[in-house]
Image: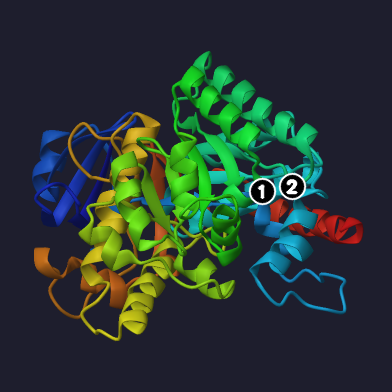
């Protein structure tokens, strides 16, 4: 048993309780009790004690869309005299070449390094969308090994696409099926799977039908990029649809709990279709800005009652950073200083929690009796009082991923005093750089 005491605890429970001079009692993988430090120490004298030194203790953050495999793209030379000029060229000249180059070791070191960055930034749950068309079968097992070593929670999928030919598209579907069936017979409580799809414009009708049938058979939702670039919308229109949502809904890809990622070019008349499907929309502001594709119509989506989560698309592993940009982007787009605040808060601290709890089959995102002990300690000493109605302002203007000092998942400390304890970070860092150089030579 462990007591983390002398803390300011932000529970993010239903009542947004804040506990001052408080302690969280952890027994095994679970939160046993929260109360005043002195009282908890008297009640559980046999427990070990960790002094939070008046720092903030809060739930670990959740990233509902990322790409671990993007690690080696950082700083990489595209080896072309004509840099990408639009979103499609970014895909063709960078990402689709990258995923056809990845080998077994690339996949592992891309994943393990990115997972360490998640830990260092206080992210304890991720939804990864993988692609490695040079190494398909078994690729999700390699990422699983890295996730297990890291200790965090993850939902994994392989993005099916016909962009490299039907044969590889079929192999990608089979990888999702193999992996999900394997999970059903495993004891990996912290890992789940979805059926991944790249995007409507790289998927033929036959592949969409097979993916929907597989989702029915396995009884799982899907994870798919939706209307990220205008090219995706144009492709659906050329096929005779209103847009991407219209096409994917007609093929039963959009269904309850499916992760529909981006949604930049959703048409207004498609929003009721998305609402009707009960799929989740995942917003990725920094990636959208970097690729110059635009921004999702968040105001309309929220007003229509669509549940919107926040992801990073692999652009960063710092969810504090992502929520700050999401907030600013809405203000900038709508030219309204009041825009974004409530929506971004709900995305990160309400909706991401709901999405993860539903798709992982376990309640996460709260510090509450009976919940998993997934928490972070943040080196934040506020100059003003933290109260129920200003928690988000303190996070928005005061916190960042670099302030995270301790990370715990399932009652196990993964990082303490800013030192990753579950892995040999220095060895992995050196080996990752070596593997990246090897990858760049092959790219």
Question: Does residue 442 lie above or below 316 as drawn?
Answer: above
Of mark 1 and mark 2, the one earlier in the sequence is: 2
Residue designated by label 2 = 163
Residue 330 image point, x, y percent: 33, 76
* Quadrant the C terminus occupies: bottom right
> What residue lies at 29% left-to-right and 47% top-to-bottom?
275
The answer to whether one can see residue 244 in this image is yes
Q: Secondary structure at mark 1?
A: helix
State the residue in front, 443 or 339.
339
Which residue of the protein is positioned furthest toward the top in this rendering? 185
Tell me whether circle 1 and circle 2 mark residues in contact (CB < 8 Å). Answer: yes
Residue 380 image point, x, y percent: 30, 70
State the residue in front, 67 or 370.
67
Question: Does residue 89 lie above or below 33 as drawn?
Answer: below
The answer to whether one can see residue 51 in this image is no
Q: How many marks?
A: 2
Instruction: Report the coloring of the rendering.
Output: rainbow
Residue 304 image point, x, y percent: 23, 56
**Residue neighbourhood size for the residue with mark 1, other residues' Cα within 10 Å, grouped as few (<14), some (14–19), many (≥20):** some
Q: Secondary structure at mark 2?
A: loop
Q: Which mark is residue 202?
A: 1
Residue 225 image point, x, y percent: 53, 51
> What residue lies at 21% left-to-right and 60% top-to-bottom?
303
Quadrant in which residue 3 is drawn: top left
Quadrant in which residue 29 is drawn: top left
């Amino acid at each position: 048993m462990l007591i983390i005491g002398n803390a300011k605890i932000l529970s993010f429970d239903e009542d947004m309780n804040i506990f001052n001079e408080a302690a969280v009692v952890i027994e095994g993988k679970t939160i046993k009790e929260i109360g005043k430090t002195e009282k908890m120490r008297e009640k559980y004298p046999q427990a070990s004690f960790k002094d939070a030194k008046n720092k903030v203790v809060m739930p670990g953050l959740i990233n509902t869309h990322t790409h671990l495999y993007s690690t080696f793209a950082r700083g990489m030379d595209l080896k072309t005299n004509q840099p990408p000029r639009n979103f499609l060229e970014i895909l063709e000249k960078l990402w689709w070449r990258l995923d056809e180059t990845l080998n077994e070791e690339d996949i592992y070191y891309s994943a393990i390094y990115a997972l360490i960055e998640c830990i260092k930034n206080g992210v304890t749950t991720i939804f990864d969308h993988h692609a490695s068309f040079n190494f398909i079968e078994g690729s999700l097992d390699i990422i699983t090994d890295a996730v297990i070593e890291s200790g965090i929670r993850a939902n994994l999928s392989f993005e099916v696409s016909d962009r490299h030919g039907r044969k590889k598209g079929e192999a990608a579907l089979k990888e999702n099926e193999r992996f999900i069936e394997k999970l059903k017979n495993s004891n990996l409580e912290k890992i789940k799977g979805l059926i991944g799809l790249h995007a409507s414009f790289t998927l033929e009708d036959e592949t969409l039908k097979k993916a929907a049938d597989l989702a029915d058979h396995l009884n799982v939702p899907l994870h798919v990029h939706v209307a990220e670039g205008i090219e995706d919308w144009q492709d659906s229109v050329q096929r005779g649809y209103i847009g991407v949502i219209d096409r994917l809904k007609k093929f039963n890809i959009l269904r309850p709990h499916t992760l529909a990622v981006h949604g930049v070019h959703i048409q207004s008349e498609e929003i009721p279709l998305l609402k009707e499907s009960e799929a989740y929309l995942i917003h990725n502001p920094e990636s959208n800005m970097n690729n110059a594709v635009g921004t999702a119509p968040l105001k309309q989506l929220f007003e229509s009652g669509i549940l919107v989560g926040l992801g990073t698309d692999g652009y960063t592993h710092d969810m504090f950073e992502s929520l700050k940009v999401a907030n600013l982007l809405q203000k900038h787009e709508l030219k309204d200083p009041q825009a974004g605040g409530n929506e971004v808060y709900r995305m990160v601290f309400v909706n991401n929690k709901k999405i993860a709890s539903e798709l992982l089959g376990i309640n996460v995102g709260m510090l509450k009796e009976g919940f998993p002990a997934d928490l972070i300690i943040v080196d934040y000493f506020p100059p003003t009082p933290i109260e129920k109605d200003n928690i988000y302002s303190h996070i928005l203007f005061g916190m960042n991923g670099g302030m995270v000092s301790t990370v715990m998942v399932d009652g196990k400390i993964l990082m303490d005093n800013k030192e990753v304890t579950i892995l040999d970070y220095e060895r992995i860092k050196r080996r990752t750089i070596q593997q990246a150089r090897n990858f760049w030579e092959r790219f």
